[in-house]
Image (cartoon, grey):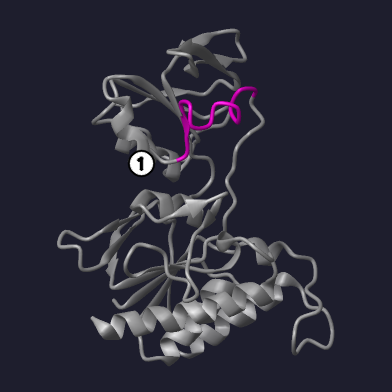
C-alpha cells in the first residue's frame, strides 16, 4: 500500500482525507476511539454553531474518510521498522506486518508511567521506554518489563535474545495476552525502583514488591497500555525531544517516509491544530510516495 496512518483522531483522519484526495492508497490503523471520543463537548471550532460531543465529531470524521474510500483496520501497532531493502516501512501489529511507502504517526503522545518511587528519577539510568533502542546495553543482564498487554509482550520479546533473564511485571493486573514460558511473569505490585551507585552514577539495581520482596534487575522497560507516536518514533530512530516527535514544516521526521502530526508533535493540544498538521502530513506523504 502507499500510506499507512496510525491513529484515527483529527490528525489521522485529516491526513487520510488529504492523502486520499491526492491519489494515494491509504489505510488507517487504529485500536479504537482515542482522546477525542472522551471529550464531553467541542466548542470554538470553525463550522460548529453549537457544541458537539467528541464522539460525534470523531464519528463524522471517520465516516467522511470512509466515503472517500480510505480503508480502516482495527489493530494495535507495537512497532515500526524499515523493510529489508530500506525502500519502505513496515508497521508491526500482534496479528500482521503491513508494508507501506510512507507512514504518518498520529497516535498521540501520552506516556503512561505509574507513580512508583524511583521510576522517574532513574530514567536514563536503567529505566527505559524503548527496548529496541536499549536492548543492546543489557546483554547478559536481568531486565524487567512493566506492563500486561501486547505492547509489553512485544518489548519483552525484543529483549529475550540479549538479556540473561526477562521478567514481565504486571503491577497487580492479570496479563491480557498469553505469555511464553521464556518470560517470567510477576503479578505482584511494584512499590519502588531501587538503585545502587556504580562508577559514581546511580543505576537501577532492583524492584521492591508489595510482599516485601526485592528482585534484582539491571534494567526496567516501561510498556504500559499501547504504544504512542513518540514510542513508535523512537523504535525506528526518529528524532524525539521532551516527549514529542521532532518534525519539519512538512511534518516529516528525520526518517525517510515517516511523518507525524497532532498531539505527538507538541504545542497546542487542540483539534484545529491536529487537523491542520494532519492535512500537511497527508499531502507531504502523498508527494513523497509519488516521488519514488
The quadrant where residue 164 appears? top left
For the N terminus, which image quadrant?
bottom left
Q: Give the overall secondary structure of the magenta segment.
A: loop
Where does the magenta region start and end? 117-129
- The one nearer the camera, 60 or 128, is 128
Magenta stretch: residue 134 in it? no
Residue 147, x across and y down, in percent: 50, 35
Q: 7 above or below 282?
A: above
- Residue at 23 percent across and 81 percent down: it is 292
Q: Residue at x 40, y 51 (%)?
A: 78
Q: State the image coordinates of residue 264 (x, y, percent, origin top left).
A: 56, 60
Q: Residue at x 48, y 86 (%)?
A: 18
Given residues 170 and 160, the one toward you in this image is 160
> Which residue occupies 48% across, 34% down?
175
Give the percent coordinates (x, y) of residue 75. Answer: 43, 60
Q: Return the residue found at the far front.
A: 200
Q: Which residue is mark 1?
A: 133
Foreground: 218 or 150? 218
Q: 33 left or right of 259?
A: right
Q: Residue furthest right?
A: 50
Q: Quadrant of residue 282?
A: bottom left
Numbered marks: total: 1
Above or below, comparing residue 1 to residue 154 in the picture? below
- Whether the magenta-drawn stretch holds residue 123 is answered as yes
Vertical side of 187 occupied by 226: above or below: below
From the viewer's side, name the closer residue of 272 and 1: 272
Quadrant for residue 161, please give it. Answer: top left
Q: Position of residue 23 (x, y in %)?
A: 36, 91
Taking 109 as reference, is 189 above or below it?
A: above
Is residue 20 in sight in this rendering?
yes
Secondary structure type for disc 1:
helix
Residue 69 shows up from this direction: no
Amino acid at each position: 500500500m502507499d500510506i499507512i496512518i496510525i491513529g484515527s483522531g483529527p490528525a489521522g483522519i485529516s491526513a487520510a482525507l488529504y492523502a486520499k484526495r491526492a491519489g494515494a492508497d491509504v489505510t488507517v490503523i487504529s485500536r479504537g476511539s482515542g482522546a477525542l471520543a472522551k471529550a464531553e463537548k467541542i466548542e470554538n471550532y470553525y463550522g460548529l454553531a453549537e457544541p458537539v460531543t467528541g464522539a460525534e465529531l470523531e464519528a463524522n470524521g471517520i465516516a467522511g474518510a470512509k466515503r472517500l474510500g480510505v480503508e480502516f483496520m482495527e489493530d494495535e501497532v507495537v512497532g515500526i521498522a524499515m523493510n529489508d531493502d530500506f525502500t519502505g516501512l513496515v508497521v508491526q501489529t500482534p496479528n500482521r506486518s503491513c508494508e507501506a511507502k510512507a507512514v504518518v504517526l498520529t497516535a498521540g503522545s501520552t506516556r503512561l508511567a505509574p507513580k512508583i518511587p524511583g521510576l522517574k528519577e532513574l530514567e536514563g539510568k536503567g529505566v527505559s521506554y524503548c527496548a529496541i533502542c536499549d536492548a543492546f546495553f543489557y546483554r547478559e543482564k536481568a531486565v524487567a518489563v512493566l506492563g500486561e498487554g501486547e505492547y509489553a509482550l512485544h518489548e519483552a520479546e525484543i529483549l529475550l535474545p540479549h538479556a540473561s533473564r526477562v521478567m514481565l511485571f504486571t503491577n497487580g493486573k492479570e496479563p491480557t495476552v498469553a505469555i511464553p514460558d521464556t518470560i517470567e511473569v510477576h503479578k505482584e505490585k511494584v512499590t519502588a525502583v531501587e538503585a545502587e551507585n556504580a562508577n559514581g552514577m546511580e543505576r537501577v539495581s532492583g524492584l521492591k514488591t508489595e510482599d516485601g520482596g526485592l528482585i534484582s534487575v539491571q534494567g526496567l522497560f516501561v510498556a504500559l497500555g499501547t504504544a504512542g507516536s513518540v514510542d513508535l518514533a523512537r523504535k525506528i530512530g526518529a528524532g524525539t525531544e521532551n516527549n514529542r516527535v521532532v518534525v519539519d514544516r512538512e511534518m516529516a521526521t528525520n526518517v525517510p517516509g515517516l511523518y507525524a502530526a497532532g498531539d505527538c508533535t507538541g504545542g497546542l493540544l487542540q483539534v484545529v491544530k491536529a487537523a491542520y498538521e494532519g492535512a500537511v502530513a497527508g499531502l507531504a506523504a502523498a508527494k513523497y510516495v509519488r516521488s519514488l
